[in-house]
Amino acid sequence: MSSRDDNDENNVTARQLLHAATGDRDAEAAALADQSDADPDAAKLAVKRAHGDVSDRPKIESDLASPDDVRVAESDHPNPSR
């Protein structure tokens, strides 16, 4: 396990982990958005990147997106409604 994974384990909620384990990407993103008080679309993008579902950037190091990954997604694709 990388040091990033060790640090991010503390940032993952049980709700996010449950939805990640069951493969429910939308629910996983909703849990991450709630945790990070972020835009739901940015959380969905971060979750997709974590699972390697999009190719706009290299896959992130962890299989679970963190609030930091959501902030990166928000800066890459700002939501004009926020």
Image (cartoon, rainbow, N blue to C red):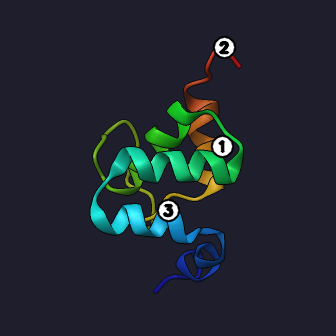
Neighbor class of circle 1 (other Cα within 10 Å; few <14, some 14-19, many 20+) is some
Distance from Cα at disc 3 to Cα at disc 2: 25 Å
Name the side, left or right, on which 10 lies relative to 42: right
Instruction: Check disc 2 and report the residue beneath it.
Output: 81
Going by the numbered disc 2, the residue's amino acid type is: Ser
Name which of mark 3 and mark 2 comes first in the sequence.
Answer: 3
Going by the numbered disc 3, the residue's amino acid type is: Gln
Of badges 1 and 3, nearer the viewer stands 3
The quarter of the picture where residue 19 lies is bottom left
Q: Is residue 14 above or below residue 57?
A: below
Q: Is residue 63 visible?
A: no
Of badges 3 and 2, nearer the viewer stands 3
Instruction: Check disc 1 and report the residue beneath it.
Output: 71
Q: Is residue 79 above or below residue 44?
A: above
Neighbor class of circle 2 (other Cα within 10 Å; few <14, some 14-19, many 20+) is few
* Residue 12 image position (x, y, % from top left): 58, 69
Seen at 64% across and 32% down, the residue is 75
Q: Is residue 3 above or below residue 50?
A: below
Q: Residue furthest top?
A: 80
Name the side, left or right, on which 22 lies relative to 65: left
Closest to the observer, 38 or 3 = 38
Closest to the observer, 81 or 8 = 81
Seen at 57% across and 52% down, the residue is 32
Q: Which mark is residue 53?
A: none
* Residue 26 image position (x, y, % from top left): 39, 44
Distance from Cα at disc 1 to Cα at disc 2: 16 Å
Q: Which mark is residue 16?
A: 3
